[in-house]
Image (cartoon, rainbow, N blue to C red):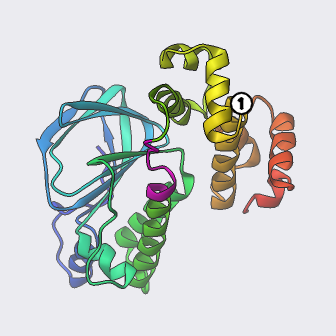
């Protein structure tokens, strides 16, 4: 396991103690295939980004799967058991007390008002880069690192709240549409067959298209394209990936097709979003 820093590491100076107060755990850590721990719970807000591999989280009788590119957001007091997948897993881990986020948001208390004890956020490169920025600041302790970490915490709060607001389940959706939408949300960046989505949701291809048109005013194919373009924008603006890397990471078959689809959706080319 490769640790950047966590609360179990010995510290001898006040700067390190201050870093611990800003996050009880802040590290990149690798797990061997099948490695597990828990169940356990704590008073901290826990955020884990899956950098590679896959893992499972067991909580309240549910088994949730997280793959590369997913973020797990675990509410305080949630008992959970973690297990790495068959190829292992590498996580960016960030755990902090709620009062840290209250400090970053300028409030006396803080709550994300999560709809579930564990929330999956799929394919959000901005959340990943913000978590990484917080970890880097706390691990390296450069000049004004505390202020820089709090600024990144403030951005993280905004990104998490946006997700909670826009991706909260719509109780008005038919169950088959909610299931199909969830399947697409989790798999849109890879190879995905709409016929398989319809089959897993227990409906026909035609019914899948009808449900999307009636309730979302968009076709399933365009819905997938929208997810891919949104992820591409996040990855390009982070400046951590080349245009070609973003193309294939977001499920596009070629840079040429990616460029056409991207310009059709945004009116701009991928290079105009790319941050060097």
Dot 1 alpha-carbon crowd within 10 angstroms: few under 14, some 14 to 19, many 20 or more: some
Q: Residue 217, located in which quarter of the rendered image?
A: top right
Q: Is residue 192 visible?
A: no
Q: Is residue 138 above or below residue 42?
A: below
Relative horizontal placement of residue 176, taking residue 275 as reference (left or right)? left
Q: Camera-side residue: 29 or 185?
A: 185
Residue at numbered disc 1: 221
Q: Camera-side residue: 188 or 17?
A: 188
Give the residue at x 44% y 63%. Answer: 161
Image coordinates for residue 138, horizontal then vertical, percent:
35, 71
**Which image quarter is the N terminus in?**
top left
Give the residue at x 47% y 58%. Answer: 165
Q: Is residue 170 magenta?
A: yes
Q: Is residue 102 magenta?
A: no
**Which image quarter is the C terminus in?**
bottom right
The residue tagged with tag 1: helix, strand or loop?
Answer: helix
Image coordinates for residue 230, horizontal then vertical, percent:
66, 49
Image coordinates for residue 124, horizontal then vertical, percent:
54, 50
Q: Is residue 204 above or below residue 106?
A: above
Q: Residue 83, located in which quarter of the rendered image?
A: top left
Q: Is residue 52 visible?
A: yes
Give the residue at x 75% y 58%. Answer: 274
Image coordinates for residue 169, horizontal then vertical, percent:
44, 44
Q: Is residue 115 above or below residue 37?
A: below
* Magenta span: 163-171
Q: Residue 51, located in which quarter of the rendered image?
A: top left
Give the residue at x 15% y 60%. Answer: 8
Q: Camera-side residue: 84 or 105?
A: 105
């Amino acid at each position: 396991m490769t640790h950047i820093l966590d609360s179990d590491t010995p510290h001898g100076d006040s700067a390190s103690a201050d870093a611990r107060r800003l996050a009880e755990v802040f590290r990149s850590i690798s797990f061997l295939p099948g490695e597990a721990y828990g169940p356990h719970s704590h008073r901290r807000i826990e955020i884990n980004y899956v950098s590679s591999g896959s893992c499972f989280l067991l909580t309240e009788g549910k088994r949730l799967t997280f793959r590369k590119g997913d973020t797990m957001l675990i509410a305080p007091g949630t008992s959970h058991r973690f297990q790495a997948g068959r190829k292992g897993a590498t996580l960016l881990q960030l755990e902090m007390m709620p009062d840290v986020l209250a400090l970053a948001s300028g409030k006396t208390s803080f709550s994300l008002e999560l709809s579930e004890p564990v929330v999956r956020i799929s394919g959000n490169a901005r959340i990943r880069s913000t978590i990484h920025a917080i970890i880097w600041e706390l691990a390296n302790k450069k000049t004004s690192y505390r202020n820089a970490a709090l600024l990144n915490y403030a951005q993280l709060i905004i990104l998490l709240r946006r997700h909670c607001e826009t991706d909260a389940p719509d109780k008005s959706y038919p169950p088959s549409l909610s299931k199909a939408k969830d399947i697409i949300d989790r798999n849109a960046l890879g190879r995905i067959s709409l016929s398989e989505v319809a089959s897993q949701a227990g409906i026909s291809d035609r019914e899948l298209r009808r449900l999307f048109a009636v309730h979302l005013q968009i076709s399933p194919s365009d819905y997938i394209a929208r997810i891919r373009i949104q992820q591409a924008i996040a990855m390009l603006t982070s400046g951590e990936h080349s245009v070609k890397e973003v193309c294939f990471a977001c499920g596009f078959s070629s840079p040429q097709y990616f460029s056409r689809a991207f310009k059709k959706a945004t009116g701009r080319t991928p290079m105009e979003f790319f941050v060097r």
